[in-house]
Image (cartoon, grey):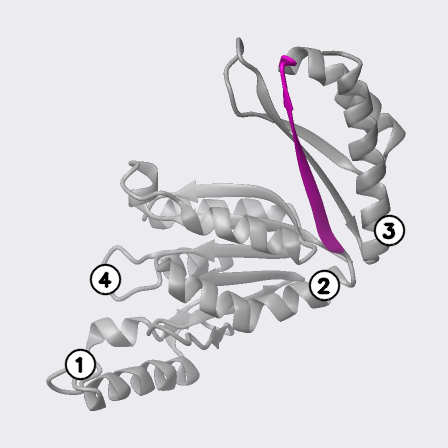
Amino acid sequence: MNRRMEMICIGNELLIGKTLNTNANWLAGRVTALGGVLKRITTVGDEIDEIKMAVNHALQRRTRFIIITGGLGPTHDDMTLKGVAEALDLELVVDEKALEMVKAKYEAYFKEGRMDRFELTPSRIKMATIPEGAEPLPNPVGTAPGVIIDVKGSLLIALPGVPSEMKAIFEESVKPLILENAGEGLFFEKSIFVDGIMESALAPLIDEVIRENPYVYVKSHPKGEERIPHIEIHFSTLTEDSEVAERRLEKAVNRMLELTAHNR
């Protein structure tokens, strides 16, 4: 199974520090838990050439899933799909399925009294304008549909930047695809905390645990200061069997506790 994944986050607000990239954090944890292997997170601004370049680079690496967040809305700086279309040398077209999705949303807003009148303005039609051959993905909580297109075996998926919309489309439409491609492999993890040992002294102990437990990934995360060490040690493994995962993690954790006890 091809579990390789990349993420492209789009938005000037991410690059200038105005907005914290919580989408990347949530998606990274979610796809990992589902058995995907995230290899890269790229952040670019609302510029067609930058989006085009990021998409092309991800495709060149033959990544199975390329998840893009942001830039699907109705405003002038929502350029994601134009950048994708240029990267793939495709035309942007008003997709009938996408237009029906957008239309249904605004009709519902009008009936709910959230709009004075129902009208499909150019800005609203823009959200139904997608690369030719792409498929729209329903947006359960917002207006702009997500988009998916198969590019020579790479699934390129564009999701809105609004976190609630991104999460809703992911859970409904993207999660099943990841599970299908990841097979039965799932991500399991445990953490312990160690005090009083500097990370430089902990490094050879981690190396020893990794050598003895080749199916467990071990990573240290300092939480304190150099003079008052407080370090999280994170253990993870990928397997289809929860009992196997438990045995792997327990063995690695116990060995680490044994080594750190002797090195305080």
Residue 259 to residue 172: above or below: above
- Pointer 3 or 2: first along the chain: 2
Q: Quadrant of residue 258?
A: top right
- Residue in front for this viewpoint, 2 or 232: 232
* Front: mark 1 or 4: 1
Within 10 Å of disc 4 (Cα), the crowding (few <14, some 14-19, many 20+) is few
Q: Secondary structure at mark 1?
A: loop
Dominant secondary-structure state across the stretch colored magenta: strand
Q: Is residue 228 left or right of residue 243?
A: left
Residue type highlighted by circle 2: Asn
Q: Which residue is mark 4?
A: 75
The N terminus lies in quadrant: bottom right
> Whole-percent x and y of residue 190?
69, 41
Residue 61 lies in quadrant: top right
Q: In whole angstroms, how far apart are the C-alphas of marks 4 and 2?
A: 34 Å
Residue 181 is marked as 2
**Mark 1 = which residue?**
114
Question: Label 4's element?
Answer: loop
